[in-house]
Each structure stands twice: as structure tokens, then as C-alpha cells.
């Protein structure tokens, strides 16, 4: 119930207040789930949705497709750059930072 | 694959919880099946490989899967294709069909080889394994389509695909084409050898299907910004 940090002054008082406010078996409206410490950033700040990756490489490849009638041999260079970009984007997507960006902190 | 659970977030320590389990802990290393790695002379081993060998001395190693061998005839792509073709666990039947397919490809190519003139003989590929690999890589789509809902409507958005997904799609299209769009009294090895030889020379229905997918992706390139990943 109480937070497990050493500096329990405010947290302990809040916990005690929560217990005192328990009227008629109803739940108190405030419980100290997190350590009551100021964070480095504001919560509820949702970072916006990311933008699509590899769009320039994709458009270059599609332009070469249009010129060369969708042949794979002549567009091999653009296709390779697109694959490299896609591989990099996937590695970044799976990495820790990208996962962190999704969640409101 | 990992998930972020709400209880983790509440404690402000974002732990990743495993969704799929493995009988091996992360300490275990992958086995090295390729025999040529072990026949290398000490001078030819690079520093990275030396570091790997040092690590192997102190770490346990996973058991090899039963479909992986260190035989000269083992090919991971063919092994994956037989697993995909298998029905009801009948791997023996799938493996026999693949062997007959490779034999059929070899026969057809040898027939062509012996009938061709001296100049053209170099251009004819007789190795069924290279034909198989080349045909599958020719069938792989470069770009895929994903349905994204925006403003109540569903849009087909062009997206890049991973290597595994592309390989899977090529094999799936090949199998579906051979199972559904052919006469029911033809043998599977016959159908497969025909399709593989057509794909090797960039013809046939599977290559056409790939090009159609590319065309749809190209026409939908304006929707590419609807992606957020």
C-alpha cells in the first residue's frame, strides 16, 4: 500500500489520510501508488504519432518502376536502397527508444 | 514479442514482459551447423569469430532443431518450403514431392541443354537448387499493402515488408497457384516444376501477381502518409 521509498514523510501522511477517509467501507479517492516525487517531465504529455518511414526511397523506387515498366532488374539500385531503409526503420522500431516514445510518461 | 503492462507503468519502471516463452534462458547460444566453419585454419579465423569461440567455451548451447542437419544436402530454404507444403504432419510425403520436383526440373533443363547449340549451352542453368532459389527470389514482392482505417474508410496503404514476410508470401503464392489453379489430375511435382521454371525466367502467374501488387501499391502511393510506423 505505502510506497517503498525511504523519504516517507508526505507519502505516509497521504496513506494515513486515505485510511482516515475510508467512510462506510468506501474506497478513498487517493492512494499513493507511485513515489510522491517530482518527475523531470510532465505526465499526460502524449507525444504525437510518428510519421511514415522510408517515403522518399519508396517514391524514388515507384518512379523508376513507372519509367521501366515495373522491371526488377533495371530498378535494382532503388529497390536496394528501399530495403536498407526499411531494415533500419524496423531495427529502430524494435529498439527500446521507439517503444518508450509510444507511452505517455 | 514483448508487451508493456499497465501495472509496470504505474510503478514507473517500464519492464518488458515476455509473451512467448522458450525452454532456453537467454544465456544459451545458437548451434553452428555449418561444417565449413569448423574446418577453417587458425589463420583464417577473424577476431570476431575468435571472440565468439571464446564465448562458446563458457556458455551452454541450444539443441538443434530436428529439421536442421549438417549434411551437404541440407538447404534451409527447401526445408522451410517442405514444412509449408506439409499437410497433417506428413513430412515424408512433402519431402518426396520436393525431391521429385527437383528431379523434374533437372530433367527438363538437361533436355534443353542437350538440344541446344554449343553457344547457348552455357546460359542454361541445370542446378535445380539455384533454379529454386532464383525463382523464389523473383517471386518475392518488394512492397506490401496494409489496410488502414481513416475517417471511416479503409485505405490500402503501401508498406515495406520484412525479409521473412516476403519469403513467406513468395512460397505461399507458389503453393496456392499449384494447388488451386491447375488441373486436378496433374501431380504436384509436375505443377511445381512448371511454376518454378516459369518464375526462374520471370514469366508465369506468380510473377504476374507480384507485378499487380506493385501496380496497386504504386497507384496508392498517395496514401503512404497514412502510416505511422
Image: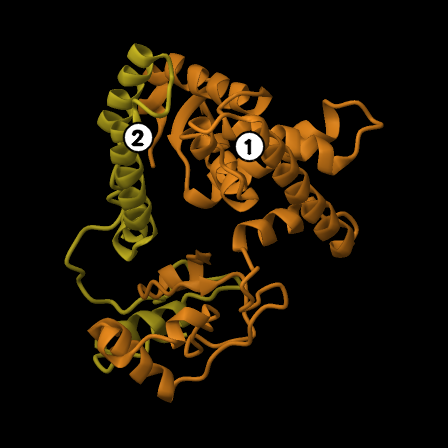
Chain colours: A yellow, B orange
Viewer-nearest residue: B106 or B17: B106
Viewer-nearest residue: B18 or B165: B165
Q: How busy is the neighbourhood of tag 1: few (under 14 within 10 Å), some, or many (20 plus)?
A: some
Which residue has dot 2 on it?
A79
Which residue has dot 1 on it?
B113
Q: Is residue A44 left or right of residue B165?
A: left
- Residue B155 visible in rendering: no
Q: Is residue B79 left or right of residue B121?
A: right
Q: Secondary structure at mark 1?
A: helix
Q: Is mark 1 in CB contact (under 8 Å) with mark 2? A: no
Placement of the C terminus of chain B among the 4 image quadrants: top left
Q: Secondary structure at mark 2?
A: helix
Is A49 above or below relative to B216?
below
State the count of labels.
2
Q: Quadrant of residue A82?
A: top left
At a point 40% along the width and 30% down the height, the residue shown is B142
Q: Position of residue B15 (x, y in %)?
A: 37, 65
- Quick one: which residue is furthest to the front in this view? B118
Q: Is residue A70 left or right of residue B194?
A: left
At a point 49% along the width and 43% down the height, the residue shown is B130
Q: Write down the chain letter for disc 1.
A: B
Viewer-nearest residue: B76 or B56: B76
Is B162 above or below relative to B222?
below
Q: Write down the chain letter for disc 2.
A: A
Q: Position of residue B138 (x, y in %)?
A: 46, 31
- Residue B23 visible in rendering: yes
Q: Position of residue B184 (x, y in %)?
A: 83, 26
Measured Cα–Cα span from mark 1 to mark 2: 33 Å
Amino acid at each position: 500500500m505505502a510506497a517503498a521509498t525511504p523519504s516517507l514523510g508526505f507519502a505516509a501522511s497521504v496513506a494515513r489520510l486515505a485510511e482516515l477517509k475510508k467512510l462506510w467501507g468506501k474506497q478513498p479517492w487517493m492512494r499513493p501508488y507511485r513515489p510522491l516525487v517530482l518527475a523531470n517531465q510532465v505526465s499526460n504529455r502524449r507525444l504525437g504519432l510518428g510519421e511514415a518511414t522510408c517515403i522518399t526511397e519508396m517514391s524514388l523506387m515507384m518512379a523508376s518502376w513507372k519509367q521501366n515498366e515495373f522491371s526488377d532488374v533495371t530498378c535494382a539500385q532503388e529497390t536496394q536502397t528501399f530495403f536498407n531503409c526499411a531494415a533500419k526503420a524496423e531495427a529502430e522500431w524494435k529498439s527500446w527508444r521507439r517503444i518508450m516514445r509510444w507511452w505517455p510518461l | 514479442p514483448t508487451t508493456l503492462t499497465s501495472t509496470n507503468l504505474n510503478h514507473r519502471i517500464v519492464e518488458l514482459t515476455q509473451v512467448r516463452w522458450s525452454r532456453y534462458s537467454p544465456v544459451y547460444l545458437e548451434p553452428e551447423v555449418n561444417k565449413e566453419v569448423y574446418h577453417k585454419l587458425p589463420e583464417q579465423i577473424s577476431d570476431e569469430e575468435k571472440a565468439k569461440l571464446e564465448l562458446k567455451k563458457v556458455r551452454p548451447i541450444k539443441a538443434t532443431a530436428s529439421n536442421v542437419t549438417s549434411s551437404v544436402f541440407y538447404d534451409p530454404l527447401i526445408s522451410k518450403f517442405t514444412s509449408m507444403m506439409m499437410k497433417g504432419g506428413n513430412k515424408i510425403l512433402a519431402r518426396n514431392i520436393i525431391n521429385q520436383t527437383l528431379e523434374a526440373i533437372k530433367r527438363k533443363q538437361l533436355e534443353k541443354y542437350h538440344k541446344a547449340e554449343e553457344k547457348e549451352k552455357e546460359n542454361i542453368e541445370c542446378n535445380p537448387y539455384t533454379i529454386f532459389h532464383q525463382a523464389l527470389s523473383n517471386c518475392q514482392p518488394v512492397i506490401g499493402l496494409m489496410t488502414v482505417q481513416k475517417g471511416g474508410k479503409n485505405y490500402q496503404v503501401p508498406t515495406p515488408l520484412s525479409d521473412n514476410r516476403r519469403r513467406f508470401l513468395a512460397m505461399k503464392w507458389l503453393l496456392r497457384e499449384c494447388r488451386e489453379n491447375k488441373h486436378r489430375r496433374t501431380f504436384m511435382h509436375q505443377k511445381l516444376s512448371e511454376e518454378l521454371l516459369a518464375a526462374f525466367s520471370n514469366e508465369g502467374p506468380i510473377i504476374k501477381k507480384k507485378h499487380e501488387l506493385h501496380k496497386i501499391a504504386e497507384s496508392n502511393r498517395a496514401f503512404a502518409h497514412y502510416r505511422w510506423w
